[in-house]
Image: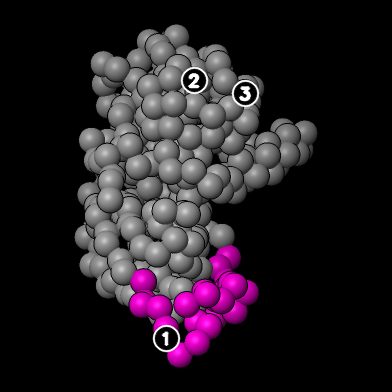
Amino acid sequence: MARGLSRRAVLAALPLSTALIGPARAAAPGLTLSGKFVQGGWAIGRTAPRAVVDVDGQVLTTASADGWFVAGFDRDAPPASTLTVSTPDGSATHEAAIAAGDFDIQRIDGLPPEQVTPTDPALLERIAAENLRKVAGFASQADIEGFRDGFILPVVGARRSARFGGQRILNGEAKRPHYGVDLATPVGTPVRAPAAGLVAFAETGLHYEGGLVLVDHGQGLITAYLHLSKILVPAGTYVRQGQLIAETGKEGRATGPHLCWRMKWRGRNLDPSLLVGAGPFRA
């Protein structure tokens, strides 16, 4: 998770509102929220423009120029979360109860050992270099509001072969949970942007992911598309909802053709399927 700044330090750096000149003070920010308050879930809110957004004691984002913002609840989020929006004129807080997620245990056997527990020094060096580039992609914080139009599925007619959050047992060895939704499709199935956004990363040939695309939908809400056979948009491209961005494959650590669809916000792992059908979000 990205390390947060203190709210006091951030507010001290903000310019004073012109409403503070003279005896009158502007009103404290309002706060409206909608979302899925569950492990792996999300919240989309509206508040004062450029208000500082603090989640569980960490400043994690700033509202857009129109006051919109996103917050996410990790797969392992605790049962309560405190969200505070602040301006130099005051603050507003929402205390959210976070429901427990329903997660599977997923057993996958027959993977090449180097895909499960790599030992070759050259391969480990390659994986480390790839990870640095991916971390930079996930750190994108585009000042856009692509999330406001809601989300659609990135592939049509796919079979969901794995749900988000399942505990992975690979070749009999317990690994970290699976942070994606697996959508089984033939190789070459079109992958479309589920919401508008900025392509923050696009590379083929990665050890674990094969072809990988990351799209920032605003506020650092990043969706990831793994195991792609073909990438059709370079990094830096702004894509519209429904725009063709890639084709599915079985590259990297995969036992068959599918799309692994993931979502992150500020280092928190979210379930992208929970946003499908939500929105559009309007004033």
Residue 6 colored in magenta in the image: yes
Q: Earlier in the sequence, mark 3 or mark 1?
A: 1
User: Which residue type does callout 2 highlight?
Assistant: Ile
- List the single residue furthest toward the bottom: 23
User: Which residue type does callout 3 highlight?
Assistant: Pro
In this rendering, which labeled residue sits more in front, label 2 or label 1? 1
User: Which residue type does callout 1 highlight?
Assistant: Ala
Give the residue number, with chain letter if any, for mark 2: 245
- In this orientation, does residue 171 appear? no
Give SS at disc 2. Answer: strand
Give the residue number, with chain letter if any, for mark 3: 234
- In this orientation, does residue 189 appear? yes
Foreground of the two, 19 or 276: 19
Q: Residue at x 31, y 37 (%)?
A: 150
Q: Is residue 115 above or below residue 169?
A: above
The dot on residue 278 is none
Q: Residue at x 30, y 66 (%)?
A: 31
Give SS at disc 3. Answer: loop
Q: Position of residue 278 (x, y in %)?
A: 24, 40
**What whole-number distance in Å separates the C-alpha atoms at marks 2 and 1?**
51 Å
Q: Is residue 135 above or below residue 20?
A: above
Region of the chain picked out in magenta, as a range:
3-29
**What whole-number distance in Å separates the C-alpha atoms at marks 2 and 3?**
9 Å
Q: Residue at x 23, y 35 (%)?
A: 277
Foreground of the two, 76 or 139: 139
**What whole-number distance in Å separates the C-alpha atoms at marks 3 and 1?**
50 Å
Q: In the figure, residue 10 lies in which quadrant?
A: bottom right
Query: Is the residue marked by circle 2 packed among few (<14), some (14-19), or many (20+) residues within 10 Å?
Result: many
Q: Position of residue 217 (x, y in %)?
A: 46, 40
Give the residue number, with chain letter if any, for mark 1: 24
In this rendering, which labeled residue sits more in front, label 3 or label 1? 1
Instruction: Decide whether the magenta segment is chiefly helix, strand or loop.
Output: loop
